[in-house]
Amino acid sequence: MAKINRRSFVQSLGVAAALGLSGGAETSIATGEPNSAATNAVKSVAVGESRDPLTITVVPSGKDDTRSLQAAIDRCLKRKQRLALGEGVFHISETLKIDRCLNFCLAGMGAADPNAKNGWAASGRALGTCLRWKGAAGGTMLLIKSSMWPTISGLFFDAAGSAGVGIQMSTVFGWPTSGVRLRDITVSRAMAAGIQFDMPSQPNGDNTDLSDFDSITLNKCAVGIRVCNDQSVGHYWRRINNSFSQVAIEFLQGGDVIIERGWQDGPGPADATFFKTHGGGENAAQIQISGIHLEHGRLFDSRLAGIVVGIRGIQDSRSDTHAPPLCIFGKWAGAVTIMASQLKGPIIATPETSVTLIGCTYVTASVPHPVRKLVQGTKKVHVL
């Protein structure tokens, strides 16, 4: 696939209007002609009444909801409406697809865990909406492709230990997926990745960027969030919680990533990793992580050279005696800055790596130690 020029793409947004993607009458993407077949196909969709004419509401049937949900999505994409999912569990057996949209909104009642012992209430929620996978092993629950600025919120994706991916974002046919906004989302028990950008076997030439996540919980997934596209420009994430996932965030290839007010306060294996990277990409320049509450595992594991890393506001609450290395920079020729953090466990770096510690403390069992002792493998250590 040819690489996508972002400037050319922005200029092509005028084409989107001509194709009926930015509002107006219901049209066929392929021809621009009125799409009566699409209109007729959704007349039988069972949807709830809504006082808002711009919103369609769907409630779970207790059976397989795949066809009704897909028909409702297609209808909303055509008519530029929002889709609201009611309280309860929707069973899906095939991938739900959001394809070539601008500003589509899909909203549930909240990402409460339906598997909790006492139902929604155990998640501290009065209401919740769950999508539960009933399809073939290794499948994908929701595919967002070639779409601009969709918003998905208030949903619990239960992969049930069978689906491979909870939410997949991909670029096809030269149309990038950009500006995906996820709010109050939980992905549980995904066998490959809870949330995935493009495909690990095809990391080059795709542009899936400018994602904006807030309040994301990753529970018992092989990998929580995996990024594997070459041309992404930046990702902006807040409040990322990992529970029992071996790797919370894995960057195979991608651009910049900024994680603000993140947290990792769930239980998990002692050797888990919050952020792991061993790729790059032509736009990769920096990784910024702040506001992590670390109770298990390690914070950062890098096999990538040449990117600036900034870490700020880390509360290291791991066991004094069983804390693995906090950070590993196994292939590095850049600069690392750690600010305003309480640290435990060593920081392992290559001899070429420069490490600067600003306003950090090293405390075990309430006993302070020289913070410089935490850094191993390099003499380029600056303490301010």
Image (cartoon, rainbow, N blue to C red):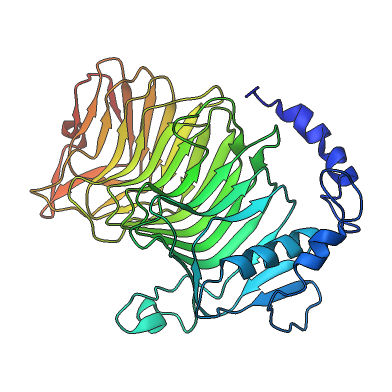
Q: Is residue 384 left or right of residue 19?
A: left
Q: Position of residue 277 (x, y in %)?
A: 37, 32
Q: Is residue 384 visible?
A: no
Q: Position of residue 178 (x, y in %)?
A: 65, 42
| 358 vs 94: above or below | above
Q: Is residue 266 left or right of residue 216?
A: left
- Front one among 154 and 167: 167
The residue lying at 55 percent from left, 80 percent from top is 61
Q: Position of residue 351 (x, y in %)?
A: 24, 16
Q: Is residue 377 visible?
A: yes
Question: Looking at the rendering, in which quadrant would you find the N terminus?
Answer: top right
Q: Position of residue 267 (x, y in %)?
A: 24, 60
The residue lying at 64 percent from left, 42 percent from top is 177
- Front one among 165 and 13: 165
Quarter occupied by residue 306? top left
Q: Is residue 210 left or right of residue 118?
A: right
The residue lying at 57 percent from left, 50 percent from top is 143
Q: Is residue 151 left or right of residue 286?
A: right
Question: Looking at the rendering, in which quadrant would you find the C terminus?
Answer: top left
- Front one among 285 and 33: 33
- Front one among 381 and 43: 43
Quarter occupied by residue 261? bottom left
How many numbered marks, from 0 up? 0
